[in-house]
Image: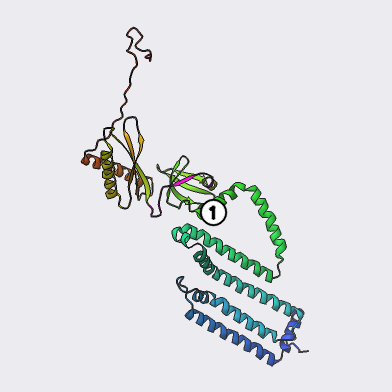
Amino acid sequence: MTTLPIDYPAAWRPWIEAFLAVPALQWGLAASFLVLGIFFWSVLISLGGKIGQSDPSAPAWRQWIHTLRWSTANLCFILCLWTGLAALSGFPPAFVKLKSLGFRIAIACVAAGAAIRSANILTQFFQRRFFPEKFSEDEEIALITTRLFRGLILLVAALVILDNLGVKLLGLLAALGFVGGAIALASQSTIANIFGYFEILADGIFRTGDRISFQNYDGFVRLRGLRSIRLESLNGGILTIPNKQFVEQQVRRLTDDQGLSLLTIEVGLLYSYDRARLEDTIRVICEALAARFPGGEPVGRFYEFGESAQKFRFSVRAGYRDGLEFVRDTTAAHLTVREACDKAGISFAFPTRTVALSSPINPSRNPHSEFLP
């Protein structure tokens, strides 16, 4: 037994005595493994930085090397340190337990770091593999799916780490299942709105900034939230509509993929105009709208025989994004139609009505009474 020069507490004495009793050869071997671990750590960090690349456009294997260089280097150092400590003998059983616990915690930390750093690369892989068009069309879809994939990857990593640390996952998952069931029963409407949000994203019904027509609502989508959609009406008012209503009802999207929204102009023409005159009128108005709204692709159609006019409806796409711009472009479209018709000598029909009486007025009747048929 090695004699201690200083009177240490009784709890420390076995540890200190074992420490002093370790042969120099074992200490040298442990130190060698520690130095070797530091050497490998430095080499892996250096090589990973030179070979790997963080640019998303780089090959996947280069991204993996750059992302996992720290985790790989730390793992190599921990293994070397563990091997060096295993070369030491004569310590109390508590040291072995403490060493094993420390090793599991260190491995768990390395695994957590690798999972966090790998989540982005795995998410990009799933995006490119399964949803390439959706992510290129809608940034919000890319953001929400990125968060979902990242959360799923980290959840799996956390379960694996907890299992390695000796945590009993079966009871934990059962408890979480009961709690989740209770929450689901208490918030069915909220869950329905959340599922509605994902259905809106998956089907691509509309995007943030689009103009939509829904039931009696007409306006611009300002926010797609997990619970509701925030809609700005054409007059500037803000409306909040639950997501599940958009899934259950028909929604008309009035904005195309280029960000141009629909405008409609209705025109009533004289009944004296024959087919050739009407076709020429459609051509004149469409040309004027095309010049005023480049890329708007105006279209005109005859849609109704009115009481006093032959009614035509012209559709054109414009770049308005809010109520004020809508008023501006609508006014410009109507003035453009009026100017084109004036130049071409095209006349609009005035509201008129012809009333035919089947019998003359009887002057002996009260003039304020109704006429007899």
Q: Which residues are magenta?
A: 247-259
Main secondary structure along the magenta-highlighted residues: loop
- Where residue 367 sits, quadrant-wise, is top left
Position of residue 260 relative to residue 6, above or below, is: above
Secondary structure category for the residue under label 1? helix
Please give the name of the residue rendered at 73% of the width and 86% of the height, measured from the top-left corner.
89
Q: Position of residue 43 (x, y in %)?
A: 53, 84
Whether residue 70 sits left or right of residue 159 in the image: it is left
Q: Which residue is mark 1?
A: 198
- Residue 288 image point, x, y percent: 26, 46
Judging depth in this view, the residue of 257 and 305 nearest the camera is 305
Instruction: Name the residue at the right extreme.
Output: 1
Spot occupied by residue 113 in the image (x, y as percentages of width and height): 58, 72
In percent of width and height, residue 76 lies at: 60, 81
Q: Nearer the viewer, residue 106 or 352?
A: 352
Q: Is residue 249 above or below residue 114?
A: above
Viewer-nearest residue: 353 or 155? 353
